[in-house]
Image: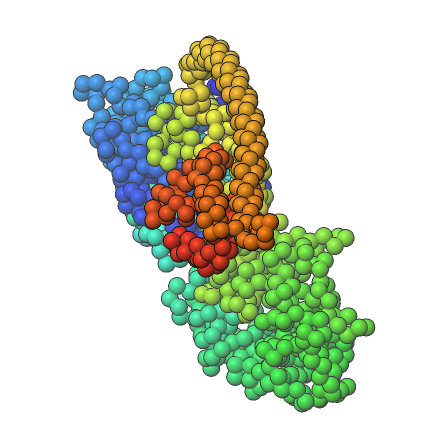
């Protein structure tokens, strides 16, 4: 299944690339030089010398380098060493993708084992004993199922995993050639032979080539062979092996330059690498079409190997470096590498010459008109030193707008027409074919056509502003713009003066812009600003954004210049970047800027110049020369892009490629390598970097933006299946198909099947343990509930007992209070009884003092003393106090003890007074009890306060009640 997929993929790739050969014959430009893309030793990081170049069916380039086999996929260089580390002298690739290489005492083949990895198999090991190869293999030719390896001493034929060795009968070989299904090889000195059925057969006209050193043999015409030699130039051989010398325009140059190798390109051109003069390309008539050398692009003039890639561009292996020559491109160049002509501001083809207006003057060179390549040799036109702004061809005259004025150019001479400085732009006036209007440093100038040609007429008065861009829009109205802004000028009928100048700025609807330039687009004026194009409405006298145009132009809406290219085509220039814009039907616009990307930044900003040389050919002024662009419909269509290649898959540190994954297998990547980097490339070669777009199915939400980066890092990928998709875009906007790379991130160890089984077993064990723990927990919970219930019951009983005790205590207290109240009543009654008794005794005493006998006489003193003694004894009887004290102690327990303990200086009378005061008795009552006067009670109260140290503001009775 995988084998079938590989075959189908190879067939698809082959069909894509064969479309080049099936396309109509393409023409190589004879004017200018093709772009040369250089790859220095510092780029490919290998040896200086590159002996041979080959390309695979997938477009990958292989170079036989002094250090080994170089592989280049358009993005990455890789170096692979032979087992014996020798120099690789030859390389060839078969249709199955095997890369055959030959070096010193070693030859074999390489196979791509996936993602940039190469595996080598030695074929020379099949030789044993004395047959072992000892010299270098210089040529490899693939002929169907057999491969021929040629050294200077032996020719080895590899077929069916066996080797056959052919010697030159004691003569050394030079080089083997395969052309029109025949094998030729030169023996030194016997000459050219053909290999037939394992035998070397001498050609009949071989003596004609003796000593010439045949280095290339190529198909020519219908059935002939072109022979290129190092010393004697070019020869032709017909189908009968008859050989004849071919004298042509290229023959002398090739002999002098020492032809070294050759190939046929674009069906009817021949490219020869030389030792001394780089690459010479000729057509089938022998005319030199191109000559590419160190002076116009190559790193080195010594070409050791030459090959065409799938785009039909030439790769050359040099004595120092590798170069790619874009012969199959619409743009060719002339570069002033010496800096002798300066910066180009204008260019024109006129009178068989090309004229370049630069900051140093006006230069001219012959414009090649023949069939052979001619290099440019520019010469300064006498008297033209200084800044040239404009070159215009008007009615058969070449007019030069110069810093010093305006001139008529006649061959290599200048004829002054005007001394008005700074001739910027010339425009023909509407309805006045015999009059030109010129914008200058100091306003406008008028030129009239006379019998002798265009002549300066006059300056227009009334306006002196610099006018770099002018566009007449009617018989007497002219738009003019320059450093000082935009003006609409109204001229008088004689074109002698400006009658009215209308200034337009942001108040008129224009944006604030670094420039406002006016150009004609499809017969109507448009105004370029750095905010986009604007249109003028003459009814409202205001400007409005040209949204319909700006929206389709993209970044070129901010163009500073428009140049008409004919047939609804225009050049839009945005500060040194150019685009080819075609206005189609119903307002459709096609914008092509990618194929001109190599010119970006190579033009003088705001002074860009593009001129049509002839139909479909344009001359573009550059800083250091010019470019020649041939429109696409005059060059055969290019083939479709191949599919991008996945080159490496690696994580941040450890290469996954070491696992030897094959291209049609989905690698399984360990989870510990889930930070991966995918590198990709498209073997499609261009000086403008390709752009890529990717999408990772299972990770990305949408396709990425187009980017020049040829690798992408994905970090912390989750385990699962992924599909990485990538496509590429060429500089001309053509997109490739989608390449898919499937891979799997394996689960982490903790999600493997063993881990899952352990988890399941652990879960069961945990479940059982949890069940037991739960039961134990339930039991403990029950016990805890029971303990809580018992505790709460005990607490309830204790609380109930406490409440009962409190109730009992309350009852006891109430009973005690009642008893105390009863005792207090009793005590009060006792006290009152004593008071009453004492009062009664006092009354009896008083009555006795008044008592008289029957005779009216008072009682005798003896009688009164006896009675008073009885009364006094009754008053001072301690029994009343003892009864009172006993009752008082029962009601007021420990009162006397505490009082005596705190105040030991108190005497019994003080204690009695304290008791009576605690009972809240009045002084009168106390006096009666103590048998003293009320005044005596007050004195005792005073003395008691002092003994008790009672403050003045404190009531004595309250103090005693608080004890």
Q: Is residue 278 left or right of residue 889?
A: left
Q: Is residue 477 left or right of residue 30?
A: right
State how the image is colored. Answer: rainbow
Q: Please report the residue visible at 77 percent of the width from the left and 70 percent of the height from the top.
A: 537
Looking at the picture, does residue 615 appear above or below residue 737?
Answer: below
When asked about the image quadrant of residue 869, the answer is top left
Q: Please report the residue visible at 75 percent of the width from the left and 52 percent of the height from the top.
A: 585
Counting every numbered tag in the picture gives 0
Residue 32's spot in the image, x, y percent?
Answer: 47, 58
Q: Is any atom of residue 714 visible in this view?
A: no
Q: Residue furthest front?
A: 855
When asked about the image quadrant of residue 212, the answer is top left
Q: Residue furthest left?
A: 130
Residue 357's spot in the image, x, y percent?
Answer: 51, 72
Residue 347's spot in the image, x, y percent?
Answer: 54, 68
Q: Quadrant of the C terminus?
A: top left
Q: Please report the residue visible at 62 percent of the width from the left and 86 percent of the height from the top.
A: 464
Q: Is residue 510 left or right of residue 855?
A: right
Looking at the picture, does residue 268 appear above or below residue 788?
Answer: below
Q: Is residue 175 left or right of residue 549?
A: left
Q: Depth check: 755 or 432 in front?
A: 755
Q: Depth check: 606 or 260 in front?
A: 606
Looking at the picture, does residue 7 appear above or below residue 476?
Answer: above
Residue 703's spot in the image, x, y percent?
Answer: 57, 39
Q: Depth check: 466 or 847 in front?
A: 847
Q: Is any atom of residue 256 visible in this view?
A: yes
Q: Depth check: 84 or 779 in front?
A: 779
Q: Please report the residue visible at 50 percent of the width from the left and 67 percent of the height from the top.
A: 604
């Amino acid at each position: 299944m995988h084998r079938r997929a590989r075959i189908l993929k190879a067939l698809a790739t082959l069909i894509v690339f064969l479309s080049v050969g099936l396309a109509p014959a393409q023409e190589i430009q004879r004017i200018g030089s093709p772009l040369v893309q250089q790859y220095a030793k510092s780029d490919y990081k290998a040896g200086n010398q590159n002996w041979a170049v080959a390309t695979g069916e997938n477009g990958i380039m292989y170079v036989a380098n002094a250090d080994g086999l170089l592989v280049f996929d358009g993005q990455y260089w890789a170096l692979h060493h032979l087992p014996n580390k020798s120099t690789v002298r030859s390389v060839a690739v078969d249709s199955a993708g095997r890369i055959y290489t030959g070096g010193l005492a070693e030859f074999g083949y390489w196979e791509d084992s996936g993602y940039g990895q190469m595996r080598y198999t030695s074929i020379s090991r099949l030789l044993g004993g004395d047959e072992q190869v000892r010299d270098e293999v210089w040529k490899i030719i693939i002929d169907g199922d057999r491969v021929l390896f040629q050294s200077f001493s032996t020719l080895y034929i590899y077929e069916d995993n066996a080797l056959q060795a052919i010697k030159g009968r004691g003569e050394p070989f030079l080089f083997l050639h395969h052309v029109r299904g025949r094998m030729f090889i030169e023996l030194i000195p016997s000459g050219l032979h053909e290999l037939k059925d394992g035998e070397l057969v001498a050609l009949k006209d071989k003596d004609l080539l003796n000593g010439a050193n045949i280095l290339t043999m190529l198909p020519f015409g219908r059935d002939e062979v072109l022979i290129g030699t190092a010393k004697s130039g070019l020869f032709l051989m017909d189908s009968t092996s008859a050989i004849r010398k071919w004298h042509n325009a290229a023959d002398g140059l090739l002999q002098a330059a020492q032809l070294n190798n050759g190939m046929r390109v674009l069906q009817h051109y021949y490219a020869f690498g030389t030792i001394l003069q780089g690459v010479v390309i000729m057509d089938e008539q022998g005319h030199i079409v191109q000559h590419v050398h160190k002076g116009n692009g190559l790193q080195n003039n010594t070409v050791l190997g030459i090959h065409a890639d799938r785009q039909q561009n030439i790769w050359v292996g040099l004595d120092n470096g590798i170069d790619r020559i874009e012969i199959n491109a619409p743009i060719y160049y002339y570069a002033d590498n010496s800096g002798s002509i300066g910066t180009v501001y204008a260019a024109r083809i006129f009178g068989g010459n090309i004229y370049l207006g630069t900051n140093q003057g006006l230069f001219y060179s012959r414009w090649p008109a023949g069939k052979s390549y001619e290099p440019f040799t520019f010469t300064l036109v006498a008297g033209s030193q200084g800044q040239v702004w404009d070159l215009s061809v008007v009615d058969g005259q070449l007019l030069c707008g110069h810093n010093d004025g305006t001139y008529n150019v006649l061959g290599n001479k200048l004829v002054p027409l005007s001394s008005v400085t700074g001739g910027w732009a010339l425009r023909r006036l509407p309805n006045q074919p015999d009059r030109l209007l010129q914008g200058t440093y100091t306003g406008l100038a008028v030129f009239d056509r006379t019998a002798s040609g265009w002549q300066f007429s006059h300056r227009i008065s009334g306006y002196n502003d610099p006018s770099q861009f002018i566009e007449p829009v009617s018989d007497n109205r002219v738009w003019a713009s320059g450093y000082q802004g935009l003006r609409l000028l109204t001229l008088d009928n004689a074109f002698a003066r400006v009658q009215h100048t209308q200034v337009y700025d942001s108040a008129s609807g224009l944006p604030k812009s670094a420039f406002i330039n006016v150009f004609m687009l499809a017969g109507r004026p448009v105004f370029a600003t750095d905010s986009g194009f604007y249109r003028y409405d003459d009814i409202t006298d205001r400007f409005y954004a040209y949204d319909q145009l700006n929206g389709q132009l993209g970044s070129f809406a901010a163009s500073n210049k428009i140049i008409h290219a004919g047939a609804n085509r225009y050049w839009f220039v945005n500060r040194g970047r150019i685009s080819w814009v075609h206005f189609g039907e119903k307002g459709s616009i096609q914008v092509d800027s990618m194929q001109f990307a190599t010119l970006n930044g190579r033009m003088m900003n705001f002074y860009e110049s593009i001129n049509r040389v002839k139909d479909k050919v344009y001359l573009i002024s550059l800083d250091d020369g010019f470019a020649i662009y041939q429109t696409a419909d005059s060059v055969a269509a290019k083939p479709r892009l191949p599919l991008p290649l996945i080159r490496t898959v690696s994580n941040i540190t450890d290469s996954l490629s070491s696992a030897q994954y094959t291209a049609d297998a989905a690698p399984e990547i360990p989870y510990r390598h889930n930070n991966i980097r995918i590198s990709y490339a498209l073997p499609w070669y261009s000086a403008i970097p390709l752009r890529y777009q990717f999408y990772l199915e299972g990770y990305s939400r949408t396709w990425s933006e187009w980017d020049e980066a040829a690798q992408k890092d994905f970090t912390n990928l989750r385990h699962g299946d992924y599909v990485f998709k990538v496509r590429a875009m060429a500089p001309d906007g053509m997109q490739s198909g989608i390449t898919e790379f499937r891979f799997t991130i394996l689960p982490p160890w903790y999600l493997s099947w063993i881990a899952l089984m352990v988890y399941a077993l652990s879960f069961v064990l945990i479940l059982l343990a949890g069940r037991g723990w739960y039961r134990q927990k339930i039991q403990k919970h029950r016990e805890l509930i029971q303990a809580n219930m018992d505790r709460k019951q005990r607490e309830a009983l204790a609380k109930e007992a406490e409440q009962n005790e409190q109730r009992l205590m309350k009852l006891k207290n109430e009973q005690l209070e009642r008893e105390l109240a009863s005792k207090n009543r009793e005590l009060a009654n006792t006290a009152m009884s004593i008071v009453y008794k004492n009062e009664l005794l006092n009354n009896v005493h008083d009555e006795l003092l008044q008592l008289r006998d029957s005779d009216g006489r008072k009682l005798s003193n003896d009688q009164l003393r006896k009675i008073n003694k009885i009364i006094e004894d009754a008053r001072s009887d301690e029994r009343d106090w003892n009864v009172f004290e006993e009752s008082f102690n029962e009601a007021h327990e420990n009162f006397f003890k505490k009082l005596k303990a705190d105040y030991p200086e108190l005497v019994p009378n003080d204690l009695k007074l304290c008791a009576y005061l605690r009972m809240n008795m009045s002084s009168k009552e106390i006096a009666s009890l103590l048998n003293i006067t009320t005044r005596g009670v007050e004195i005792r109260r005073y003395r008691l306060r002092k003994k008790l140290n009672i403050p003045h503001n404190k009531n004595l009775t309250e103090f005693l009640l608080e004890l």
